[in-house]
Amino acid sequence: MGNLFGRKKQSRVTEQDKAILQLKQQRDKLRQYQKRIAQQLERERALARQLLRDGRKERAKLLLKKKRYQEQLLDRTENQISSLEAMVQSIEFTQIEMKVMEGLQFGNECLNKMHQVMSIEEVERILEETQEAVEYQRQIDELLAGSFTQEDEDAILEELSTITQEQIELPEVPSEPLPEKIPENVPVKARPRQAELVAAS
C-alpha cells in the first residue's frame, strides 16, 4: 500500500547507522563467546581437579594446557571488544562532527545571503546619508536660532509669560460675608419635625 503511487519512502537509516549496528552486533557476539569460554574454563578446571584426585596427572596436564590456550583467546576477545567499542565511538563522534559542520555550513550560507542583501557599500551609503541629514538639520537649527533679533526674543518671552499666567489664573474672592457656622450637634431640620410630632400626639 505504501508504494501505491510509485514513490519510495526514503529510509532515515544511514550507512553510518548500519555500520554502527553491525559493530555492536559483533561486539555482542564476542561477549556471548566470552561467556561460553568462561563457563567452559570453570568446568575444565573442576575436571582437572577431579583427574588429579583420580591420579590421572597427564590427562589433567593436557586439560590445563587447553584451558591456558582458551584464556589467551579470552584476552584476545577482550582486545577485539575494546577495538569494536572504540570504532563505534569514533563513528558516533564523527556523525556529531558532521552535523556540526552542516550547521556551520548552513549558517555561513545564511550570512553570505544577508551580506549580499546588505553590502559594505550599502551600509556606507546609508551612514553617509544619515550623516548628511544630521548635518542639514544642524544647519537649519543654526539658521533659526541666528535669525531672531532681540525684539523677537523679548516678544517670545512676553508671550510665554502671558500663556503661563492664563494657566495659573485663580478664581476671584467673594465680596459678600460668609454665612454663620451652624452647630454640628443639633440638626436644624430635626427641631421642627420634633415639634410636629408633639403637636400630633
Image: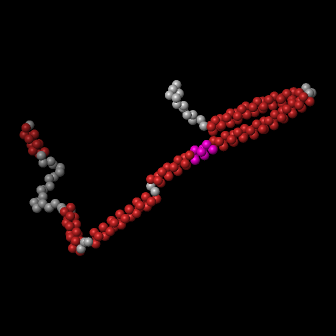
Q: Position of residue 178 (x, y in %)?
A: 12, 58
* Extent of the magenta region: 94-101
Q: Quadrant of residue 161?
A: bottom left
What percent of the width, then of the height, locates residue 7?
A: 52, 31
Tell me which residue sits at (70%, 34%) in the image: 26
Q: What residue lies at 52% left-to-right and 50% top-to-bottom?
A: 108
Asked if residue 167 lies left or right of residue 81, the reply is: left
- Residue occupying image coordinates x 19% and y 66%: 162
Q: Where does the C terminus fall, quadrant-wise? A: top left
- Tell me if I can see residue 53 in this picture: no
> 30 or 68: nearer the eye?
30
Which residue ends up furthest to the front in the rendered image? 6
Q: Is residue 132 above or below residue 190?
A: below
Q: Quadrant of residue 43?
A: top right
Number of numbered discs? 0
Confirm whether the magenta stretch covers residue 99. Answer: yes
Q: Residue 74 in the image: x percent, y percent?
A: 78, 36
Q: Quadrant of residue 146?
A: bottom left
Task: Answer left or right for 111 relative to 83.
Answer: left
Q: Position of residue 60 (x, y in %)?
A: 89, 30
Please, which residue is most extreme toward the bottom here? 150
Magenta span main SS:
helix
Q: Nearer the viewer, residue 77 or 6?
A: 6
